[in-house]
């Protein structure tokens, strides 16, 4: 097996197979070892409860890290005197309390809601150096794919699988097919990794990566920051792929070096040596291959209710009849109806009332810098009712404050919040009202995702800032 | 896990493509710490529309749902599977499923049966008036007419489903192999072992 040229994914997979069934067919279910398990409050309580009922323990609490993010309100968590403020919603409070109880009782390291490192689980993992190249990383959340940005094999799992990993540190999995997305060239000015991944999903469709693990390859990714790579890999799931990854390189190594959970000293040197071997071999064959020219990527926004419904900011909203597939035509009609949009209208003429800068896709320091650069010296339009910035973690928040970005945002009329998932999903108090439109840096424009009846337009942080300033979807390059 | 062999009954002809898990169970239902009672919120937005298939008397407690491509895409929430079970659904037929959903369905003893679009279209037609049968052992979907549609299923999953095996129990039975792997890993990739040894 080792003599055949292998892809990056296959190398990581092979290094983690604990046991294969007696059959030799590699498509069969294997037992795969899991190196890192991130746990949050929403998808874990039933898993811990089931462990307790079965009298089982957590096999490797030392490889597990818990942090609350999804339903935690993003308003102040501490009173001026330092006392913890209560959470109003009793169900959210109970779910949080469950994680607060479960983590220590199973011996798991827990980052408290008011700890400086608290944040969205997918921001925290890489930031703490918990997510490492070549590691298998899971979390009960589909955007776990993000950690592929550091060269890990990372994917979302359901609660029964969370329970399985807690109990056994393994998963029963079938090997995925491999898919290469190659982007050569250079992204144009004002075009960000978010625009690129939205464009990619537009090309491959939401089912394009189903059953596959994507490896993003080419000069564009080689020249991309770790933050940008995390953004790209994060949305692999929107393209149907359970995981997406980029070969680790010096950019990743220097990002990770010195982070709290990253290896140190001699262990670091040995790790880097192995990490350098994690590249797709010359001659390895992918099951599917897509090539995209970087020059074709424009600032991109979504117009519908599926992440594949995207267009360049200068384009017009498509007519449902323009799609070949009849079921796609019907879906587009439904989408436009829900979104309150007419075909043929320029997307840049669409007014917005809300702006959300945050989520595990775009809440890292680079994202906040990009948005702040657009907002500096400007104010949000009067028609923008609600604009919030939600840093991905307490550390991102502190860094931004040191750079004075918080003032740029608040001067522009934004609210500066505590870290969490916030308006990315409608399960905490940050919601978009029915019928209103939101320029959002998150990853899903599903029906009701930001609140019942809410209309989401996905875009980059710079584009969301441009929307805030103009009160409509706008080309940031023209500001 | 619940043992499953044959599922027979009415099938809700939903037919929609890209039914995401936010549609199957919206996020505001996820604040629970239990697996029970989520049926009330299942397909909430679809059920709010008048004349939706869930409202049709004949489909009350129907065990099967028929949907379009990419069923269960989006969020990994297993609450989607729990909500479906709670409303009485034990099988979904669609041309394709998201990888995470099909895993979640399996863990909860819900059959996710993949069939080509033309066969799904035929079943959507039959479902309006007649019941459908899914025979897991023989891997075949049949109708009261001549239809016999064979489907694929992973042999490991099939065995677990037919025998109602506890997957964690099965894995724990390979405890030695896991321990062996951990020893090799500690030798070859030692930095993977000690992340939390660094104190804050
Ligand atoms: S920010 Fe949104 S997508 Fe990311 S983990 Fe939170 S809820 Fe999921």
Image (tube, coloured by chain):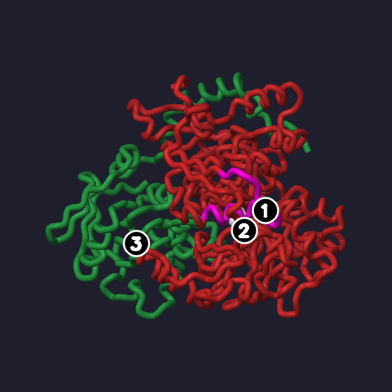
Does residue A93 appear in the picture of this structure?
no
Q: Are both tags, 2 and 1, on one chain? A: yes
Mark 2–mark 3 Cα distance, whole angstroms, equals 34 Å
Q: Bounds of the magenta span?
A: A183-201
Asked whether, in this view, residue A181 is left or right of residue A473, the answer is left
User: Does any atom of ligand 1 lie closer than 8 Å to the CB of label 3?
Assistant: no
Report which residue position mark 1 lands on. Answer: A188
Are marks 3 and 1 in one subunit? Answer: no
In the image, taking residue A243 as reference, residue B54 lies left or right, namely left
Label 2–label 1 contact, CB within 8 A:
yes
Mark 2–mark 1 Cα distance, whole angstroms, equals: 8 Å
Q: Position of residue A340 (x, y in %)?
A: 53, 78
Label 1 CB less than 8 angstroms from ligand 1: no
Residue found 52% across the figure and 38% down from its top: A167
- Residue at x 71% of width, y 73% of height: A386
Chain letter corresponding to the colour red: A
At mark 2, the secondary structure is loop
Instruction: Please state the horizontal and vertical placement of residue B172, each as a whole percent of the image.
Output: 45, 32
**Quadrant location of the C terminus of chain A?**
bottom right
Give the chain letter at badge 2: A
> Can you identify the residue that label 3 sits on?
B67
Identity of the residue drawn at 62% across and 45% down: A185
Chain shown green: that is B
Say which chain tag 1 marks.
A
The local secondary structure at tag 3 comes to: loop
Q: Which residue corresponds to mark 2? A: A298
């Amino acid at each position: 097996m080792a003599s055949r040229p292998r892809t990056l994914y296959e190398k990581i997979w092979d290094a983690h197979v604990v046991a294969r069934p007696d059959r030799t067919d590699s498509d069969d279910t294997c037992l795969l070892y899991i190196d890192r398990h991130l746990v949050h409050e929403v998808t874990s309580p039933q898993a811990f409860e089931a462990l307790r009922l079965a009298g089982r323990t957590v096999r490797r609490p030392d490889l597990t890290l818990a942090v609350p993010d999804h339903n935690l309100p993003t308003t102040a968590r501490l009173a001026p005197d330092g006392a913890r403020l209560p959470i109003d919603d009793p169900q959210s409070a109970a779910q949080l309390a469950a994680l607060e109880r479960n983590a220590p009782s199973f011996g798991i390291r827990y980052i408290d809601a008011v700890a400086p490192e608290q944040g969205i689980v997918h921001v925290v993992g890489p930031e703490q150096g918990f997510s490492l190249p070549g590691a298998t990383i899971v979390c009960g959340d589909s955007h776990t794919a993000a950690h592929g940005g550091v060269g890990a094999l990372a994917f979302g799992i359901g609660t029964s699988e969370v329970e399985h990993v807690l109990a056994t540190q393994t998963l029963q999995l079938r090997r995925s097919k491999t898919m290469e997305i190659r982007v050569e060239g250079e992204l144009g000015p004002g075009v960000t990794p978010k625009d690129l991944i939205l464009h990619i999903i537009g090309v491959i469709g939401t089912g394009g990566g189903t059953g596959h693990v994507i490896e993003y390859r080419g000069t564009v990714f080689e020249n991309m920051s770790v933050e940008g790579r995390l953004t790209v890999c994060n949305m692999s799931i929107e393209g149907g792929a359970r995981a997406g990854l980029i070969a680790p390189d010096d950019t990743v190594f220097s990002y990770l070096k010195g982070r709290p959970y990253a290896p140190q000293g001699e262990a670091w040197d040995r790790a880097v040596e192995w990490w350098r071997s994690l590249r797709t071999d010359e001659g390895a064959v992918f099951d599917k291959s897509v090539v995209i020219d970087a020059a074709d990527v424009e600032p991109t926004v979504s117009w519908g209710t599926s992440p594949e419904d995207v267009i360049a900011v200068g384009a017009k909203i498509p007519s449902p009849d323009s799609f070949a597939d009849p079921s796609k035509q019907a879906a587009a009609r439904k989408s436009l109806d829900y979104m309150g949009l007419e075909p043929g209208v320029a997307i840049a003429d669409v007014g917005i009332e809300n702006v959300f800068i945050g989520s595990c896709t775009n809440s890292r320091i680079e994202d906040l810098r990009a948005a702040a650069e657009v907002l500096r010296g400007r104010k949000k339009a009067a028609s923008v009712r609600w604009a919030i910035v939600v840093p991905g973690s307490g550390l991102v928040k502190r860094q931004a404050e040191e750079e004075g970005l918080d003032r740029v945002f608040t001067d522009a009329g934004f609210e500066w919040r505590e870290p969490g998932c916030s308006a990315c999903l409608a399960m905490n108090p940050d919601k978009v009202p029915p019928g209103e439109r939101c320029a959002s840096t998150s990853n899903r424009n599903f029906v009701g995702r930001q609140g019942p009846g809410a209309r989401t337009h996905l875009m980059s942080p710079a584009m969301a800032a441009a929307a805030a300033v103009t009160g409509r979807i706008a080309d940031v390059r023209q500001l | 896990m619940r043992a499953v062999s044959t599922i027979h009954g009415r099938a809700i002809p939903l037919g929609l493509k890209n039914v995401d898990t936010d549609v199957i169970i919206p996020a505001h239902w996820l604040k629970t710490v239990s697996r029970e009672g989520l049926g009330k919120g299942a397909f909430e937005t679809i059920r709010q529309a008048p004349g939706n298939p869930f409202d049709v008397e004949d489909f009350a407690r129907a065990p099967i749902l028929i949907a379009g491509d990419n069923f269960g895409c989006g969020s990994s929430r297993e609450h989607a599977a729990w909500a479906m079970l709670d409303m009485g659904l034990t099988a979904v037929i669609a041309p394709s499923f998201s990888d995470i959903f099909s895993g979640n369905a399996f863990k909860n003893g819900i059959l996710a049966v993949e069939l080509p679009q033309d066969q799904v279209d035929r079943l959507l037609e039959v479902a309006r008036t007649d019941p459908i049968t899914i025979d897991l052992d023989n891997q075949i979907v049949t109708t009261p007419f001549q239809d016999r549609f064979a489907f694929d299923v992973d042999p490991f999953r099939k065995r677990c489903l037919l025998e109602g095996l506890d997957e964690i129990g099965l894995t724990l039975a390979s405890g030695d192999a896991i321990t062996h792997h951990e020893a090799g890993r500690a030798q070859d990739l030692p930095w993977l072992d000690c992340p939390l040894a660094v104190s804050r």
